[in-house]
Image (cartoon, helix red, strand yellow):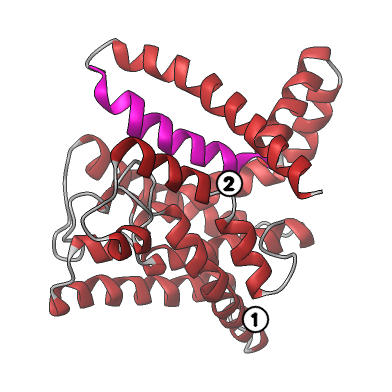
């Protein structure tokens, strides 16, 4: 909704206005940084997800280019899978370029190009959902490769350094789309049937409404969770079983406060 409505300036404005209070709170609690310009350009102090806003500002400019490539590929008779393969190749070249340019991790974390393949996959899924033409045969073939990659990097701590040099980011790199895309396609395919089942029970209707509220306030929830984990949770001992306690406390805190923040901003902007 925030992306499709308004011009470029309006999109940036809607992105930055809710974020400014978070930056001001950081200044109040943590003080003025050594280099204010670098601090501002990198999304404030390096808290969990502090780079998201910088990436989303780049998304406003990059997304139309990715969409144009999808439309060009389709017009030329190319399949969504062929387009995905081309974008995957771009991702590999981009990762290789980080070696050749010796790109620092501080700059890499602020660049959206590592997520181009996920943007393209999202466009493909949207088209599949609208036309109700889910390419199950091709999607199923992707799952084993994606599952093996996630198993290797997520549970066996294998890092394919031939392409991915940054220890922080390789677990969410391009090959994970081979697992995530088929699962999201299946969720979209089953969405209407699941929605009907949820609407048939009171608790289901409550859950649906709660998820809808969280969806509308997701950006504000993100801002709250960044501050919550960066200013509060980071100072606690979250070892072993305490991680579960932190999770059970953090989810309602971030969702409720984020929704209240969203509601407050909506009322003030009217």
Q: Nearer the viewer, residue 129 or 137?
A: 129
Q: Is residue 124 visible?
A: no
Total numbered labels placed on residues in the image: 2
> In the image, is residue 58 above or below residue 142?
below
Q: Residue at x 42, y 35 (%)?
A: 227
User: Secondary structure beneath disc 1?
Assistant: helix
The quadrant in which residue 268 appears is: top right
Q: Nearer the viewer, residue 241 or 37?
A: 37
Characterize the local packing of mark 2: few (<14), some (14-19) or many (20 or more) Cα atoms within 10 angstroms: some
> In the image, is residue 78 above or below residue 126?
below
User: Secondary structure beneath disc 2?
Assistant: helix
Q: Is residue 218 magenta?
A: yes
Q: Residue at x 47, y 56 (%)?
A: 53
Q: Position of residue 31 (x, y in %)?
A: 29, 43
Q: Is residue 48 visible?
A: yes
Q: Residue at x 51, y 65 (%)?
A: 57
Pointer 2: what residue? 184
Left or right: 194 as drawn, with respect to 186: right
> In the image, is residue 62 above or below residue 201?
below
The quadrant in which residue 230 appears is: top left
Q: Is residue 129 magenta?
A: no
The quadrant in which residue 94 appears is: bottom left
Q: Position of residue 218 (x, y in %)?
A: 60, 41
Left or right: 270 as drawn, with respect to 207: right
Q: Position of residue 229 (x, y in %)?
A: 37, 31
Dot label at residue 71:
1
Segment tinted magenta in the rendering = 216-238
Left or right: 21 as drawn, with respect to 27: right
Disc 2 from disc 1: Cα separation: 21 Å
Q: Residue at x 36, y 77 (%)?
A: 90
Judged by its main secondary structure, the magenta piece is: helix
Quarter that holds the N terminus: bottom right
């Amino acid at each position: 909704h925030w992306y499709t409505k308004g011009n470029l300036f309006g999109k940036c404005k809607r992105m930055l206005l809710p974020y400014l209070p978070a930056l001001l709170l950081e200044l109040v609690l943590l003080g003025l940084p050594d280099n204010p310009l670098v601090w501002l350009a990198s999304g404030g102090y390096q808290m969990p997800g502090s780079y998201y806003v910088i990436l989303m500002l780049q998304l406003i400019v990059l997304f139309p280019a990715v969409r144009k490539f999808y439309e060009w590929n389709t017009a030329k008779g190319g399949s969504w899978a062929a387009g995905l393969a081309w974008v995957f190749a771009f991702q590999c070249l981009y990762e290789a370029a980080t070696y050749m340019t010796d790109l620092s991790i501080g700059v890499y974390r602020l660049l959206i190009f590592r997520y181009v393949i996920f943007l393209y996959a999202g466009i493909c899924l949207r088209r599949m959902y609208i036309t109700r033409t889910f390419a199950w045969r091709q999607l199923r073939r992707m799952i084993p490769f994606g599952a093996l990659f996630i198993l290797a990097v997520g549970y066996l701590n294998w890092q394919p350094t031939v392409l991915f040099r940054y220890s922080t980011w390789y677990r969410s790199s391009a090959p994970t789309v081979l697992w995530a895309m088929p699962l999201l396609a299946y969720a979209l395919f089953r969405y209407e049937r699941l929605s009907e089942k949820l609407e048939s029970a009171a608790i289901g209707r409550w859950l649906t409404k709660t998820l809808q509220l969280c969806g509308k306030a997701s950006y504000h929830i993100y801002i709250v969770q960044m501050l919550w984990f960066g200013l509060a949770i980071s100072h606690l001992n979250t070892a072993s079983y305490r991680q579960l306690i932190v999770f059970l406390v953090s989810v309602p805190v971030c969702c409720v406060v984020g929704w209240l923040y969203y509601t407050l901003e909506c009322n003030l902007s009217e």
